Image: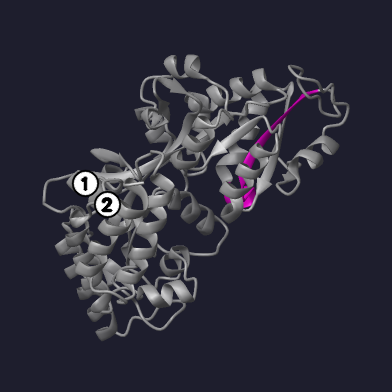
Amino acid sequence: MRRRTIKGLAVTATGALLIAGCSGGEGESATAADGRTALTVSVWNIEGTPEFNAEFDAYEEANPDIDIQPVDILADDYPEKVTAMLAGGDTTDVLTMKNVVDYARYASRGQLQDITELAESAPEGLEGLDAFDQDGKYFALPYRQDFWALYYNKGLFEELGLEVPAELTWEEYADLAKQITEEAAAAGITPAEGEKVYGTYHQIWRSLVHATAAAQTGGDQLSGEYEFFEPYYEWALDVQDAGATLDFATANSQQVTYRTMFTTEQAAMLPMGSWFIGALLQSKAAGESDVDWGIAKLPQASAGEDVTFGSPTAFAVNKNARSADAAADFVEWAAGPEGAKAVASVGATPALQSEEITEAFFALDGMPQDETSKAAFEPGEVALEMPVSEHTSDIDQILMEEHELIMTGSVPLEEGIAEMNRRVQDEVLSR
């Protein structure tokens, strides 16, 4: 369905113009030009995030009296725009919570409606709900639950005569990345773009090192003590120093994306979130890439373990919503089985998990059918990517800055960890 969207700039005024015949007034729903109830929903990059339109189409089909009007915001600007919108008294009905850090900030400021009653009646199997617990109250319900796995290029593995990376330790992963890099070069294998095939690709986000270490060791990213990062940095730096991944400085300065590295077959492996599944299906359907891929469980510190990390995405009702009742109904629907089916239909991982939904997910055209991929879709434990507290934002900034210095070789690992400890203690926790 071709959907009319509202651009995120000056959204309050723009939205008012597009909602013809508004009844207006506190407690009254806005009405669209065709007489249906207008329901505005903040989203990011709607054309590149197919689950939004899949959910909106399915909800409107089940509720023909509703006209969903997305408020589209650039993905990179989303947190700042939504923060500014709410500070200015914006009336967008449903707000998409891109991460739990922003959610906690909006909830603590009283900018979201209390939907604890909906949370208490949420369906069994709704993953990620605990992340939205604010001292026993809930202000959002998750509709998507992402987790990190290891993507791999089946064609490259077959061409090199290698077994798929079903269950690796990080040491085995590092050795395999180096082996692939060397053997691909020796075999004269060249990618569709770029100069060489790397054994893997590490996106520059700190989560690959920090969130993985926290999830797999039980370390606390808000503690101010980060020695538990060290072995994970050693594996990441080992792979980088061996030339088995594009180095951090180059990836950062040239703004290289994981999608490009994997879909152009410049990287044989890629640790990444489950949201990438939908992008791969979309890319293949559009004829943009024919890479033959699968997923495996994220490598572990020790064999036999099965812990990864992830983060839920949720919908919340704006405290100033014009169509509050319709907004709450949509949020509840999105977290339920029909919303989960809509999310799964485009290759995104719904928060509500069930055998039926998993079967529907793997029935999608282009999904791998091997047992390794199916096993990876059901990780043993998914830890929250970043804990939520009043210090989260400040600590996140410090850890990002120090992470870059370590990965670019600007400071030795031991010195970088010590600086993380000092700065978080001095600049955040002791204040």
- 340 is within the stretch colored magenta: no
| Res 402 → quadrant | bottom left
- Residue 304 percent across, percent down from the top left: 11, 46
Measured as percent of width and height from the top left, residue 85 is found at: 67, 41
Was residue 44 drawn as part of the magenta stretch in this picture?
Answer: yes
Mark closer to the chain start, 1 or 2: 2
**Quadrant location of residue 184?**
bottom left
Q: Residue shown at 51%/26% (left/top)?
A: 139
Q: Magenta segment, which residues?
A: 36-49
Residue at screen point 27% across, 41% down: 379
Location of residue 82 (image quadrant): top right
Q: Which of 9 and 72 is in front in this view?
A: 9
Relative side of 288 to 378, left or right: right
Residue placed under numbered mark 2 in the picture:
212
Residue that appears at 17% across and 69% down: 175
Q: Name the residue under label 1.
A: 219
Whether residues under marks 1 and 2 lie with C-beta atoms below 8 angstroms apart, the answer is: no
Element on which disc 1 rests: loop
Q: Residue furthest right?
A: 21
